[in-house]
Image (spheres, rainbow, N blue to C red):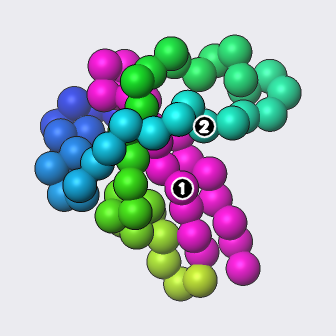
């Protein structure tokens, strides 16, 4: 993800250090080591219309990890 987009997300929500996301199977080894940032405000940016998301950002690698719940 472009650094400018990561900067927008990081400045839009009050982020705190969060645990690395739990991933399944082949995805887990592909996860950067972090540290990850996240928070309710960031989750809200990626949630809409009854669909919820938990978001974690690794700003060093510009990686965004989304966990979605679709209702």
- Residue at screen point 40% across, 69% down: 44
Q: Say if residue 39 shows up in the picture.
A: yes
Q: Which mark is residue 26?
A: none
Residue that numbered label 2 is attached to: 21
- Label 2 sits on a secondary structure element that is loop
Part of the protein shown in magenta: 51-71
Task: Where is residue 47? Give x, y as percent.
Answer: 48, 70
Task: Where is residue 42? Give x, y as percent.
Answer: 36, 58
- Residue at screen point 26% across, 32% down: 2
- Residue at screen point 33% across, 64% down: 41
Q: Quadrant of the N terminus?
A: top left
**Image vertical order of residue 45 relative to residue 58, above or below:** below
Task: Where is residue 57? Give x, y as percent.
Answer: 40, 37
User: Main structural element of the magenta stretch: helix, strand or loop?
Assistant: strand
Q: Residues within 10 Å of mark 2 (few under 14, many from 20)?
A: some
Q: Which mark is residue 54?
A: 1
**Image vertical order of residue 70 relative to residue 35, above or below:** below
- Tell whether label 2 touches label 1 (CB within 8 Å): yes
- Give the image quarter of residue 62: top left
């Amino acid at each position: 993800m472009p650094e400018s987009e990561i900067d927008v997300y990081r400045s839009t929500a009050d982020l705190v250090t969060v645990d690395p996301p739990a991933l399944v199977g082949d995805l887990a080894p592909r996860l950067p080591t972090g540290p990850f940032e996240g928070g309710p405000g960031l989750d809200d940016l990626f949630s809409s219309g009854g669909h919820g998301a938990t978001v974690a950002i690794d700003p060093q690698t510009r990686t965004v990890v989304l966990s979605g719940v679709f209702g």
